[in-house]
Image: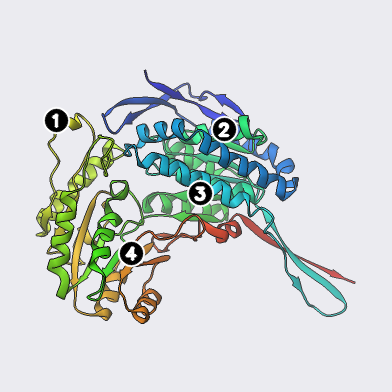
Amino acid sequence: MTLQWNHFIAGADVPPASGTYLNSFEPSTGKPFADVANGTEPDVQAAVDAAQGALAEWRARRPIERGRILLDIARKIREQSDALSKIEASETGKPPWQAPFEIEIGAQYFEFYGGLCNLFGGEKIDLGAGYHSYTVREPFGVVGVITPWNAPMNQAARGIAPALAAGNTVVSKPSEFTSGTTVALAKLAVEECGLPAGVFNVVLGEGPECGSAIVSHPEVRKVAFTGSVRAGKEIGQIAAERLIPLTLELGGKSPNIIFEDADLGAAIPGALRAFITNAGQICSAGTRLLVHKSIHDEVVSGLVEGAKQIKVGPAPDSMVGAITTRAQFERVQTYFDLAKQEGAKAEIGGEVIQNADYGDGWYLPVTVYSGVRNDMRIAQEEIFGPAVVVIPFEDEAEAIAIANDTAYGLAAGLWTQNLSRAHRVAAAIEAGQVFVNEYQAGGVETPFGGYKNSGYGREKGIEALHHYTQLKCITMKL
């Protein structure tokens, strides 16, 4: 039976004003999963009205009271992990082991920011005996949080929790392909945790119609967007006209550098995890593997042997699940074709898997390319699938040059046992976060965001709270 997701506005299920629904599909089977409300401008207007109406009371609450509600949301997420995980796995194609992990990360965001609600403090500025000057941090007001399809619960919580902690109210729009967990999160927060109705609203629909209406609305004072560079630029143009602040977390083509002194027993499996996790559908995935020439063949051989052990498919013990949307499934295949045209060698993978167990599911193989130059399109463009390109380098200077020779700057990794080199290379790399001897090291506590075309602003950590507040300076003549 197909499920139905409606908007969640002012604490209630609200059908779309258009009366129409979009179809979402289960990636592991290719079959319809849910009917998703097709949101339009009237739905966004209703959600913003609800958020604006709830703002004064939410902002005025003692921070510790807001924190208690956020902590209760974290507790309820964990209590309902099984139900939320089933929705997440069905909508995204994640393996059964992975979905609960994503739900747990969502709980950690509310737990982390719930504990930081009393963090905000101002600064006293000394202007001499005749003045008293100080600063305070205040919420923006109504914040739009627009999230993609690759990690719906994780990324919704990443933006919504700090926004609420800072005293803002939220209008969220998840991807039309993966709407269920965000709606469930909002209902859980309002119906079971005491979050006032209207503080957290969810509007469903497509980006050009529903997402643009959020960014364009005159009472939305700040937007956080995670998604493609193309969509980020479009949102940036609207925001620039309105002069509102943005947090943009966009694409990546992250370098992962293995130096000749690296512990290959850790580096090779670490490099494999860096691009296969979530079937490669992570913007910070380590998809450009830079390897010192002296160990290049050994690393490639190790990757291939490791890839052979990776189970792909719908089975409970699979490491790699389905590609979340059919469009992305087809897009990755165009890069398989492009790699052949560019002369790269598929050491493993590079073809659509033929497996009766997959049915009509959207599964692709773990793919390792050698013979790659950094100027090839497969080395410069975000594939967003379980594929890596291996590029050799001669020395540290060349590794840094190749690493930085990209339009992106979201993340980077490096593997070395030389502490001086680790600090030196990390300082030279143009990326918002650098992982040393463990790719994707860190957690909800560590700030996350990009350089260059990977966006601006920061999510996660204490730093994110500053991006959900605006600074006011008050000066009194005594």
Cα–Cα span, label 2 and label 4: 40 Å
Mark 2 or mark 1: whose residue is earlier in sequence: 2
* Side of 95 where 52 appears, left or right: right
Q: Which residue is mark 2?
A: 188
Cα–Cα span, label 4 and label 3: 25 Å
Secondary element at image label 3: helix
Q: Of the residues tagged 2 and 4, which is closer to the observer? A: 2
Q: Which residue is mark 1?
A: 356
Disc 3 packing (10 Å; few <14; some 14–19; many ≥20)? many
* Side of 221 where 174 appears, left or right: left
Residue 363 seen in render = yes
Residue at position x 35%, y 40% from top?
97
Q: Which residue is mark 3?
A: 158
Residue 287 seen in render = no
Question: Which image quarter is the C terminus in?
Answer: bottom right
User: Tag 1: residue type?
Assistant: Ala
User: Tag 2: residue type?
Assistant: Leu
User: Are dots 2 and 1 in contact, CB under 8 Å?
Assistant: no
